[in-house]
Structure formats: C-alpha cells, structure tokens
Image (cartoon, helix red, strand yellow):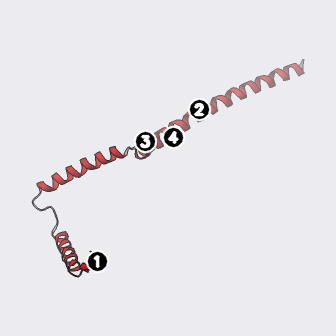
Amino acid sequence: MKIQRNIKTVKNNYKSFFIKLASISIAIVIVVNLLFNLIFAERLEKIDKILLLDKSKIRSEFKHKLRSELSKGLEKDNMIAEDDKILLYKLYLKIKEEFKNLDKSKL
C-alpha cells in the first residue's frame, strides 16, 4: 500500500512539475517576445525601410527635398554666408588661373 501511495505521489509531483515547467516556459516566451517588440521592433522597421527602398522612390524623395531646400534658399536675402562666399570666390580664382595655364594642344 505504501508503495502504491508513493508511486501516486511521485506521479502527482511529476504532473505538477511539468505543468509548472510548461507555464513558466510560456511566460518566459511571452516576456521575451514583448521585450523584443518594445525595444527592437521600431529599429527593425527603420532598417527594413532603408533596405527595401526603391531607387525611384529615393530619387523622388531626393528631388522633393532638393526643390524644397532651393525654394527656401531663394526666399532668403543672402543664400550664402559671407565666409562661404569668400571661400567660393577664392576657389573660383584658383580654377580660373588653372584654366589659363591649361595646355591647349591636349584639347
């Protein structure tokens, strides 16, 4: 009789152990899934957008951005800062000088 009771208690212990193990495992999977979605899902969406963009879509967005920036610049009185103007002018003079020294026979 004692052996049968011990076997029943052992079976009940195993049964409760496996039920607890399964419920804890499911809880861990749910928690990991929630954390992953909260932390990484947004970043993964951004990466997917970057990787899956069509070249035509990139071009159209670039054109739109360029046009909007040009129209904003045209509305201003001075498009270029004074320091930048000086640098561009110096660059222009240097390029102009190099064109003067260009060997015309190679054209």
Q: Which mark is residue 62?
A: none
Query: Label 4 vs label 2: CA separation?
Result: 14 Å
- Which residue bears the numbered disc 1? 106
**Of callouts 3 and 1, which one flags the residue occurring earlier in the amino acid sequence?**
3
Query: Label 1 vs label 4: CA separation?
Result: 64 Å
- Which residue bears the numbered disc 3? 45
Q: Nearer the viewer, residue 42 or 35?
A: 42
- Which residue bears the numbered disc 2? 27
Q: In the rendered image of this protein, does residue 34 appear above or below residue 10? A: below
Query: Label 3 vs label 4: CA separation?
Result: 13 Å
For label 3, the SS is helix
Q: Residue at x 38, y 43 (%)?
A: 54
What amino acid is found at the position of numbered circle 3 in the picture?
A: Glu
Q: Residue at x 68, y 26 (%)?
A: 19
**Of callouts 1 and 2, which one flags the residue occurring earlier in the amino acid sequence?**
2
3 and 1 marks in contact (CB < 8 Å): no
Work out which residue is located at the far top of the displayed protein and give it: 1
Where the N terminus falls, by quadrant? top right
**Of callouts 4 and 2, which one flags the residue occurring earlier in the amino acid sequence?**
2
> Which circle, 3 or 4, is nearer the viewer?
3
For label 4, the SS is helix
